[in-house]
Amino acid sequence: MQDPLASAEQLASGGDHAAAVRLARELEDTYAQQGDDGATMLVWVRLSMARWLAVQERPDRHAALAVLDAAERTWRTPAVQNTELVHLLGAELMSLRSFVLRQLGYAADSLAAGEQALAFFADLEQDAPEMLSAVGRVPLLLNRGAALADLGRTADSLAPLSRALDALRTSGAVHPEVEVELLVLQGTSLTLLGRFAEADAAETEAIALARKETGRSARHLLATALTNHATTLTRMRRLDEALDTVGEAMNVLRQVDGEPLTVPQRRRWGLPLSTEAEILLVQGRRQDAARAARRAEPILREYAAEVPLLVAGSLANVCLLIGEAEDDPAYAAEALDRLTALNTQFPGRYTYWWHRAQSLVARLTDPA
């Protein structure tokens, strides 16, 4: 008979995360009842369950974090600490924790968990290298780079992202979606640093790679890559290209999901719509910009109600866009309040938009 956890993995690989989680819950009960004898397998099951909860069609990252808390409590017991797998399990645990915390917007906590994962990985490299895969360090470096960028340490984010990309490419392993995500993250940081030509190159490469993939998650990633590239093109004042690019991103979403009806589908439209609004505003098409931003606003407010830290920057930006497009003092003031808080919390990350909000409020307060 097939191992039950392997069966759950098979269900998850086929996209049936709900069934995988149900099976994992049954296994969790089984191993919990075995006490110390089942402790190691209990950790493995909870790690798998947390991952599926975090990446399913409608992610439940709070539930994933609760499962990781339970996994860590078991991992810290002598029954696991005295096994040869303690460092491997620790690396997996902290890597997943770093990912989930980043998806909830807790960048500093994500970075701290990632540091612990890298420390466990270093121990394994020295003591048990046979336990490691050739690309085991890649997700740890990806999470580190993304968390550093989220914290406003944009220049610092480039080194771990480059190391992850190099490790992935030299390993010979084929993980195109991870490669695309790394290139997109690189492009975002390079754009924030004003290194537009390098950002353009990274994002163009990401888009070319993503176009070759046909899976649902890969097509969603293509839409993200196109949206981010449109932002870079906007900053380079290649506005017609930018508008075409974000239009393609929305067409990709329509091809994959149809018109956005479910909550996860709507959420994927928030950034393309706000990006479209930004481009239209720069082109002087204020009514069209306001229309796009107004479509993005309820999506982002709904999302922010669930994960406020993750969506804070996007919501502040759409408030700014409505304020600019409609000369609306209330939206301008809300944007400035939100961006002031973000700029204080993450110095450097939101400076560009914060200055824009300051200028808008000043203009609307004193039109003369």
Image: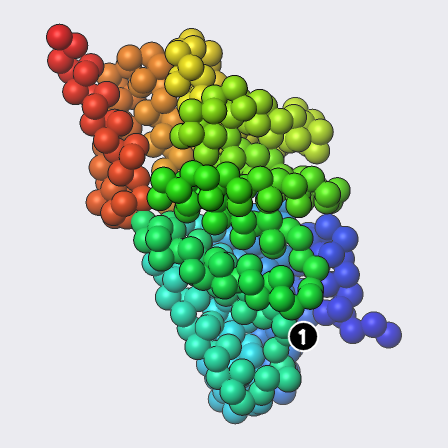
Location of residue 168 by image quarter: bottom right
- Please state if 205 lies on the left or on the right of 145 as rendered: right
The location of residue 256, given as percent across then percent down, is 70, 33
Location of residue 274 by image quarter: top left
Q: Looking at the picture, which amino acid does disc 1 mark?
A: Thr
Q: Which residue is mark 1?
A: 30
The location of residue 309, given as percent across then percent down, is 37, 45
**Closer to us: 68 or 334:** 334
The C terminus is located in which quarter?
top left
Q: Residue furthest front?
A: 197
The location of residue 130, given as percent across then percent down, is 64, 84
**Closer to us: 70 or 230:** 230
On screen, residue 84 above or below 228:
below
- Please state if 334 lies on the left or on the right of 163 as rendered: left
| Residue 63 appears anywhere in the view | no
At 36% across and 57% down in the image, what residue appears?
156
